[in-house]
Image (cartoon, rainbow, N blue to C red):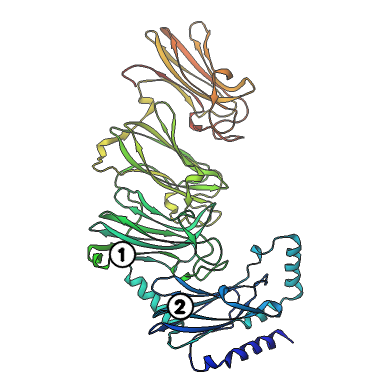
Amino acid sequence: MKLSLIALSILALGAFRPAAAQENVLADIQNVASYDIRIDGFLLDKEREISIHAISSSDQARELYTAAWILNKQTREVVWKLRNASQRRYSRGLAEYDDRVVLPRGEYEVYFSAFPEWSEKVQSFGDLLDFLGDRIFHPGRSRREHRDLSLTIYGTGQRVGNEGVDQWHEQLRKSALVSLSSLWDNDYVRQGFVLERPMDLTLYALGEANEDGTYDYGWIIDTKTGKQVWHMTHWNSRHAGGAQKNRVVAETISLPAGTYAACFVTDDSHSYRDWNAPPPYDPAFWGITIRVKDESMKRFVKTFDYEGVHDQHLIVDLTRLRDDEYQSKAFTLHKPADVRVYALGEGRDGDMFDYGWIVDAKNRKKIWTMEYRETEHAGGDRKNRMVNTVLHLDKGSYIVYFVTDGSHSYRDWNAAPPFDPEHWGISLNAVSEGFAPKDVSAYEEREDKSVLARIVGVGDHERRRASFSLSKQSDIHIYALGEGRDGDMFDYAWIEDARTGRVVWEMTYRMTEHAGGARKNRVFDGTISLPEGKYIVLYETDDSHSFRDWNEDPPDDPGGWGVTLRLVREEYP
């Protein structure tokens, strides 16, 4: 017997059940196409039993993944799943399902989806050959199976249909404090809100994430400080139904009175109405929805248009960076401050290619770097990475760096751009309460009286020199980066007595330590004492692995490749 005749027989058997003849059709979904989600809905005036009849793929179907479920409209909880129903298998991967369930008074949404999901089911080379053989020799089989898919629900109640469910969704969005939902690919949406009093908020967010990262996700920030007060990750979410990458958060958070913004970003695939894998149980609310837990508190909240990053106390702006750039900006804080670091760059598989870092200008110690593991997806292609964090910086001088490689940068993207392309690079904003422009100033190392000599940013095949003099015996701090291996140095510094030419200090391998990155990156960071006199500091490189032309991983402070000498005095801490 052919498949279509079997399916018709199944439908005929279900149509003449005595119980069904006395009940209304509450939902009826037929002929579900591949990569399709069909929706219906019904309401019950009191607790009632409903009967469900479906034709779907059997548990052993390898290339046809189908699912059906019922959602409670108000709670968004799944109250029934097809996979829990009893099943009788039939040929060619189809099966008949029958079930009965008692539901309380309420409004219910019915879903049926059909998605090929062979990639998660092919576990061996033999499975792959079987799958390819089915596709080559039975190309119309899947189409026939889809034509016979169906779900019918019987009971005493009222059917509302697909349009009724759409109206329910719209009502739910309008009643929420914030609803950034039904989001598509490459979306970046945001909404500001003000809480005039402390209150509890319920968060409901659906997105895409796995153990390697988050791709469609939301967050909430305090707009005055720039600090994130909530963030959606793989680890604070749970499976949302369908593909394993579908994640959902449903929780309550407490926020003090203040001004906030909710944000949500999606990448370039797998989103509302354009799923590349089985959808979640609540596809229409892909995004974030926020509600006031106590409805009586709604009069103390209001919304406003939030435009994103606020640059009221901008300290550093190294943004809109193009290919092959190496930019830096130094500044001095005259008092401690909290500083928001906002950086967008390129990274993949644990490595960053366009990234920033911050060093202490006095000792060249790196105090922060844009590590891949600390970034989040920045929208568009998954290699777009973002950091939005707040650092506490002590009084002192700092240098901010950002470097880009030879591709994928501002206005020259080789893949989908991030949601905020104008900020490709790094920016720093002071977010401390009471911070004023006079609390920060530009820092010029050449104007730093403690610097005796500085030779940095040295490339291949270079030999540079600089002179300095001491009016009395003094302690000298030397910070030198170079290349060395197996006891020998290839890029290194030394100091000569200008009168005699005698070497008074030399950067040897044994006196250096690992400088981060490749093991051959070496650093000397120490103090020596020199008598009164005139001196020459020299730096020499070989033909490879130098500033901006690394043949292995660069050091933690690539901009310091070379040597810097400082006079150690109490007045120059």
Spatial CA span between label 2 and label 1: 23 Å
Give the answer, above or below, for where 129 lies relative to 154.
Answer: above
> Residue at image x 51%, y 32%?
558
Find numbered disc 2 in the image and state the secondary structure of the residue it sits on.
Answer: strand
Residue at 40 percent of width and 29 percent of height = 361
Q: Is residue 176 left or right of residue 211?
A: left
Residue 66 percent coordinates (x, y): 59, 74
Q: Quadrant of the C terminus?
A: top left
Residue 446 x, y percent position in the rendering: 38, 25
Kind of residue indicated by mark 2: Glu
Q: Nearer the viewer, residue 301 or 362?
A: 301
Is 177 on the left or on the right of 273, as rendered?
left
Question: Is there a contact, CB below 8 Å, between mark 2 and mark 1?
Answer: no
The correct choice, above or below, for 95 with respect to 521 in the image is below
Is tag 2's residue or tag 1's residue first in the polypeptide sequence? 2
Residue 109: mark? 2
Name which residue lies at 66% across and 89% down: 9
Residue 147 lies, in percent from the top left, at 63, 83
Circle 1 crowding by C-alpha within 10 Å: few under 14, some 14–19, many from 20:
some
Q: Extreme top residue here?
A: 500
Question: How many numbered badges does the structure rendering display?
Answer: 2
- The foreground one among 569 and 127 is 127
Up-down: is 271 above or below 235? below
Q: Secondary structure at mark 1?
A: loop
Quarter that holds the N terminus? bottom right
- From what the image shows, is residue 178 above or below residue 422? below
Give me the disc on residue 377: none
Counting from the top left corner in percent of width and height, residue 377 is at 49, 53
Residue type, label 1: Lys
Mark carried by residue 293: 1
The one nearer the camera, 222 or 318, is: 222
